[in-house]
Image (cartoon, grey):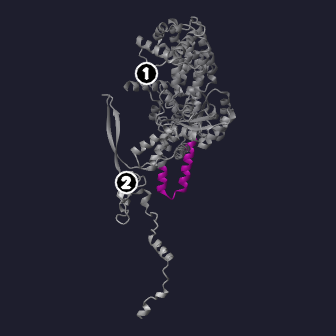
Amino acid sequence: MDQQKQSNPMSQPPVTSSNFEAASSTSNMKRKSMKPRSAVWDHFSKFLDDTGIQKGKCNYCEKEFYCDPKRNGTSALKHHMSACIKNPHSVTTRQSQLSLQPLSFSTQEGGGNYQLGMLSSWHFDQDVARRKLAKMTIIDELPFMFVEGEGFKEWVECIQPKFRIPSRWTVSRDCYDLYLEERKKLKSYFQNSSQRICITTDTWTSLQRINYMCITAHYIDDNWTLHKKILNFCPIGSHKGDDIGMDVESCLLNWGIKRVFTVTVDNASSNDVAVTYLKKKINGWGFGILNCKYLHMRCIAHIINLVVVDGLKENIEAVKRVREAVRYVRQSPARLQKFKSCCEMEGIQSKCHLSLDVSTRWNSTYLMLRTAEKFENAFDRFATIDPCFKFDLVSGKECDGVPDSLDWDYIRKIVDFLGHFYDLTLKISGSRYVTSNIFFDEISSIDCLLQEWKMSDDLTLANMGQNMKVKFDKYWGDPDKMNKLIYIAVVMDPRYKMEFMGFALSAVYGNGKGLDLTHKIKSVVYELFDEYKRMFANENANINDGHVHSNAIENLDDEGSKKRSRMNLGSQFLKHKIEIGEAKNKSDLDCYLNESIQVVDENDEFDILLWWKLNSNRFPILSHMARDILSVPISTVASESAFSTGGRILDPFRSSLTPKVVEALICTQDWLRKSHCRKSIEEQIADMERLEEGM
């Protein structure tokens, strides 16, 4: 047995040189390294320190750990991976952090500013941060590449290392998703509300040579707050009237808006065709008021521009001299610096800067004259310091281009005259307050001013006033051709009512014609009120029919019937008011007009929307009529202001944006921005000067 257990030496292979080399090479081979299988190595980097010990370094905070597989393992790395503050992939399991939000307010007595702190819980959310980033990009008109800038990345790393900065493509998608979300909310509001919408529209050609059309909606909500929302900022194929009308119709249908009260446009003939097209469509939808008789509203700002431009066609020598003087000073930095020295020697502390006008913009001419008039003494001193100021640089001869004291007196008259039109343009350009009730009052004042200007002793000024009066009468000379809503809006103002209409019309057109016009306007007011009364009765009838029908079906459920009755108490109350008014033969309008006018101090600001909000229960039908009329915009400035935003967004560095993205950026900015006031160039320059003084 022992011999069988022993190996037979003859069975072993002979030891040769080749076998010996193969055995030795096999013993010297190293084991093949395996790829790390732990998930921690997606967040750590493996390395050997100076002593040859294996370690792992965190990719986020760069903290080092021992990770030798035979001695340490990866437990410490796993623990750190979930606890690392800078790890953007870690799930927050600890308590929310507290954030102190400062609240500042001022007191009227002391006038001081005070701050209080409000504690609120806070935790980081990647999705919320991305949404806020998209909102910031839209509101502040930032380029999408802003997120890929080195400075922004360093700032985010310092503020919140957990935030994963998206690419510019992701930001653009987030901005468009935000647009779709806000559009859905606004569209739902329009579809579920019953108030009428007033729209303004205008066109603009971008840097890309694409024709855009902006459509803006104006309305007053149930809380009597005036709103302005840009609906569309889309390209159009042509400027023909029918094409514009079809584009507006398509926009309204996409938004689900059919209750259109007015359409405010400028005086282009194509817009007249477009409004005619929209009248047919709105009447076909069954939502026209008096067959859309008062749908077309002309832009007052555009008409004022035409009136003033006709007046400035007169070649007034004083204006030409001031223009040439301003041009001479602004031609070189040395002259401008010398002129500033003259201002300091004359003690002129004005922060205004000399500006040269644009021939096609009368307001720039007014601003040029208003600013130059403040530097009269500086121009006189500059003429003594710079001898070339009095000479024509081309011919070398002395010229009469330097304004004298008579010219400055002349300029002051023109500045005072144009100031009325400039202030009026600013006043009617607001979109955050009611403007329809000031339309007639302002144009009546302009008419009186032009009548006075025509009677001037100066022949040039008289011709200027005459030219402006001719253009004024073309649009506002015949009251029968004007939209009667501008008169009804005055009646809806509790400070004026019909008493002011009679007074103003008599002052403008004379006692006889003014009295006839007053009776016509009063009949128009009652005609419109009867239309609202009929619509209001039909709506209540539909509500009551539905209520009776539901009670007939649900007689078996007494509790359900009681709930239905409670839900319609408001409708029953309004119906009761109508029945009482009919019984007494005294409508809401009669009660309103028979009341004494609201007396307000000139220094006090009167909030007409607040008045109607407080008195809407007393005039249930008339308040609906007033809400629609007071929301009418009398200028297209709201739509034109969107073109300024479009010009900033479509600058030479962002001219590759598609119309779809441009519309999303402009519309969403209008819906989200809380403050719509942008500083003028003069205010920005003044801020920079104060900053330089502080430095």
Q: In which quarter of the image is the C terminus?
A: top left
The 10 Å Cα crowd at callout 1, few under 14, some 14 to 19, many 20 or more, is: few
Which quadrant of the view contains residue 465? top right
- Horizontal arrangement in the rendering, residue 530 relative to residue 689 (left or right): right
Q: Which mark is residue 84?
A: 2
The amino acid type found where label 2 is placed reads Cys
Magenta stretch holds residue 551: yes
Residue 577 visible in this rendered orientation of the protein? no
Compare residues 262 and 244 and report the one nearer the observer.
Answer: 244
Question: Where is 384 relative to 6, above or below?
Answer: above
What segment is highlighted magenta in the picture? 538-565
Question: Where is 165 relative to 624, above or below?
Answer: below
* Residue located farthest toward the bottom when viewing the structure as drawn: 1
Foreground mark, 1 or 2?
2
Q: Which residue is label 1 attached to?
A: 602
Compare residues 273 and 594 and report the one nearer the observer.
Answer: 273
Mark closest to the chain's N terminus, 1 or 2: 2
